[in-house]
Image: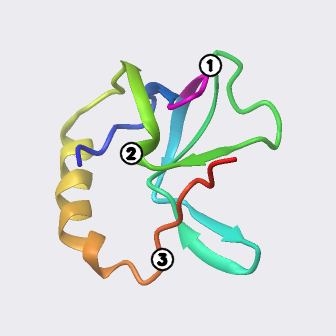
Amino acid sequence: MNVLPLGSVIRLKDGEQKIMIISRVPLYNNEGTIGYFDYAGCLYPQGQNSQMTYFFNHEDIEEIYFTGYVDEMEKEFLKQYELQKDKIKYPKLKIKAD
């Protein structure tokens, strides 16, 4: 999986709204079970102007409109992520289909 940088703008499968990635590997409380998703995002172009945050995984992405900024810090983050991802102690959560 290629981890998308912060600021990337995507559309989810079966989605109509553009979403901008604002967090990676965020924790989420799913009815008492703490787990994580690959990403958290907000509506684009509105931004994080309410309490609404969207949690999703890379496999839920249908289309990538824009890939966020990548510099040396981002490249280092990706290296560390690859080294540490198998050590995550929380379960990976999935979007429930209606």
Left or right for 81, reference 95:
left
**What is the crowding at mark 3: few (fewer than 14 residues within 10 Å), some, or many (at least 20)?**
few
Q: Nearer the viewer, residue 33 or 5?
A: 33
Q: Circle 2 sits on which residue?
A: 58
Q: Nearer the viewer, residue 97 or 1?
A: 97
The residue type indicated by label 3 comes to Pro
Q: Circle 3 sits on which residue?
A: 91
**Residue 60 position in % (x across, y down):** 46, 42
**Residue 65 position in % (x across, y down):** 40, 16
**What is the crowding at mark 2: few (fewer than 14 residues within 10 Å), some, or many (at least 20)?**
some
The answer to whether mark 3 and mark 2 are in CB contact below 8 A is no
The quarter holding residue 49 reads top right
Would you say the magenta stretch is mainly helix, strand or loop? loop
Left or right for 71, reference 89:
left
Q: Which residues are magenta?
A: 13-19
Give the colour scheme of this rendering: rainbow
